[in-house]
Image: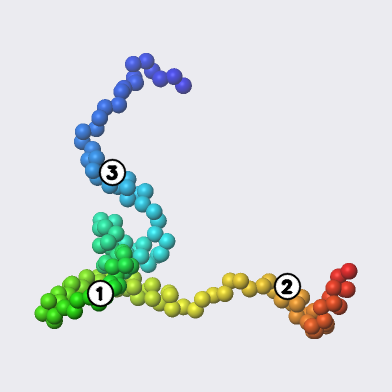
Amino acid sequence: MPKAKGKTRRQKFGYSVNRKRLNRNARRKAAPRIECSHIRHAWDHAKSVRQNLAEMGLAVDPNRAVPLRKRKVKAMEVDIEERPKELVRKPYVLNDLEAEASLPEKKGNTLSRDLIDYVRYMVENHGEDYKKRKMEVE
């Protein structure tokens, strides 16, 4: 259907739109979906990845989480300055992950019920005699 003559307007720049907020929201919506439900529910979009994981008690970089000891120089007790431990505000995430990891693993590579019954039948009738099976097929 044709438009009425003289009713088309060119697009004007929206000065009242906050571009920073617009870009941030678009980036957040385009962020990948977190597969782990425990982490996804505790995630705070206003915070960075490092801050979120630190609050949950998880490490961003596994190489920095467990530092290697340097054997070259032994420091005096006075010189050792310990980093303040980061506060874990969401320990339930870590507890849920540990509980899920401690569950026994389910075996997924089992044979079908029909194949198990067939093998049991063949072993009961023929035992370990494989030639009998071969003759039966032919």
Q: Nearer the viewer, residue 62 or 106?
A: 62
Of tags 3 and 1, which is closer to the observer? 1
SS category of the residue bearing label 1: loop
Seen at 29% across and 56% down, the residue is 45
- Type of the residue with mark 2: Asp
What mark, if any, has residue 70 been given in the picture? Answer: 1
Q: Nearer the viewer, residue 38 or 72?
A: 72
Assess whether mark 1 and mark 3 are in contact (beta carbons under 8 angstroms).
no
The residue wearing badge 2 is: 114
- Residue 56, can we see it? no
Is 119 placed left or right of 133 in the picture? left
What is the distance, in whole Å, between disc 3 and disc 1 at their CAs? 44 Å
- Type of the residue with mark 1: Lys
Assess whether mark 2 and mark 3 are in contact (beta carbons under 8 angstroms).
no
Is 2 placed left or right of 73 in the picture? right
SS category of the residue bearing label 3: helix
What is the residue that sits farthest to the front in this orientation? 72
Seen at 20% across and 36% down, the residue is 16
Crowding near pointer 3: few (<14 within 10 Å), some, many (20+)?
A: few
Seen at 28% across and 72% down, the residue is 67
- Type of the residue with mark 3: Asn
Q: x%, y% of residue 78?
A: 10, 79
Q: Earlier in the sequence, mark 1 or mark 2?
A: 1
- Residue 41, can we see it? yes
Total labels: the figure holds 3
What is the distance, in whole Å, between disc 1 and disc 2 at their CAs? 60 Å
The residue wearing badge 3 is: 23
Crowding near pointer 2: few (<14 within 10 Å), some, many (20+)?
A: few
